[in-house]
Amino acid sequence: MIKQPIDVIVIGAGIIGAACAEALAARGLRVTVIEQETVGSGATAAGMGHLVVMDDNAAELALSAYSLRLWKELVGDHPQRHEYSRCGTIWVAADEDELAAAALKAATLSAHGLACELLDAAALYAREPQLRPGLAGGLLVRGDGLVYPPKSARILLERALRDGALLVRERVRAIEDHGVLLDDGSRLQATHVVLAAGAASGALLPELPLQAKKGHVIITDRYPGFVQHQLVELGYIKSAHAAHGDSVAFNVQPRPTGQILIGSSRQFDTTDLAVEPAMMTRMLRHAIGYVPALAELNVLRCWAGLRAATPDGLPLIGPCAARRGLWLATGHEGLGITTSLATAQLLTAQIFKENAAISQLPYLPGRFQHLLAAPAGIEDDVPLTRPLPFSAMPPTANALADGRASPP
Amino acid sequence: MNQITLSIDARSISVAAGTSVAAAIAMTGDARTRRSISGQTRAPLCGMGVCQECRVVIDGRAHQLSCQTPCESGMQVLTMRQDSA
């Protein structure tokens, strides 16, 4: 059915696959995207769409800060097409310990040129009067924002299609060397295969170090002005990358419609997307602990999604030894909307053997030994599929990843 | 019959006890209650608490179902028919 030769097969049309397809098609490659479901309907639709700089480690900060710059370019003059809002994030400090953590975070972000402002309690309540009394303060990060991710995924994919990409509505049964086997028994072949299937990636390649983390999100009716910023507890940082145990964290977001998104939860060892009333209740109780008036709002809907998490909390972006010509763009956990655009640029730079704006090293799948792609020229006769020789990569111009490229 | 006086969009109105807020709103001569997300004005449809079109602000609480709420003395009702909120 696909007559033309294909340069790149992208598996998955979530935000990551759509961004990769857009970036690769813009460079003139013939791209075919394979998606069995509605574009952007998996984790892309389940998440909050928070565009947030995260600084748990230098590599996460480098990737998220770079990607936020790309988002500002993408939304550009038409922010409403993405339902973009530059709401900023307030990291809420419950006590003096958390306020000290906020001060550290402020120092890190400021050192990288990211606008932020430490808030004492009075400044916090002036901005967000719905927060419960007794909090210590917070950190306002001004450049953070939000989008409606399914729309952004659609926009990115439409751009790719305009640049000649094709969308194939099928299910991938297996990934092969330089190609895929589809459910209808047909095969597609290409120089490159990009796996961008989020939590479903593990079903296609069981050797990937991916763990699904289930999360619930609740949306309310419209209450314009109820809160002004995305509000996240600083304790979130402690729970976000935990590898076991169910947890909830306070995380609410004002949608441009006036609706409030309420999160968040993390559960392991389940891929069942059913809403669990017990987890929903726990999440709401915790959120009401921070914003008591949430208890008065009408909830419209609750749903769940799956984050694809790696052991070190960083995504897998780069060549993978499991198949010839295979590249990974998955494992973004809860940060995939933010980091999608940077992921696409890093992957494109690798495929074209160019330098990227930030160091690629922390995100290469080869940091997990069994995924390390073979050295160039040994087993692969297609030049473009060779991994970059790491030693040949120049020092990054971006100081963000300097000296701390290895994940913790 | 007992009369109850309440405020609808800052106008005082007296209705019989047991009247729903939605009915009191209709008695002002304009049954519209709210605006959709695209700005269209809406009015009660089902009258039995299902369609959600009758939502108004009652005593400061948004999204109250006016068709399911009996009028009370001194109640402050705000419809969204006049603004874009």
Image (tube, rainbow, N blue to C red):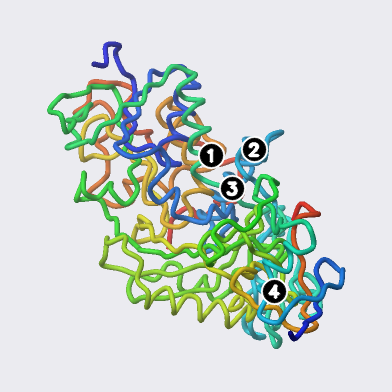
Instruction: Quote the CA–CA distance across marks 3 and 4.
Output: 28 Å
**Residue underneath mark 3:** A147
Asked whether disc 1 touches disc 3, contact meaning CB atoms under 8 Å apart, the reply is yes
In which quadrant of the rendered view does residue A69 lie? top right
Image position, residue A271 (x, y; %): 27, 60
Q: Earlier in the sequence, mark 1 or mark 3?
A: 3
- Three-letter code, disc 3: Val
Instruction: Quote the CA–CA distance across marks 2 and 1.
Output: 9 Å
**Which element carries disc 4, helix, strand or loop?**
strand
- Three-letter code, disc 2: Val
Q: Which residue extends farthest left?
A: A185
**Which element carries disc 3, helix, strand or loop?**
loop
Return the chain for callout 3. A
Asked whether disc 2 touches disc 4, contact meaning CB atoms under 8 Å apart, the reply is no
**Residue underneath mark 4:** B61
**Residue underneath mark 1:** A152
| Residue drawn at the location 50% of the way across and 74% of the way down | A249
Instruction: Quote the CA–CA distance across marks 2 and 4.
Output: 35 Å
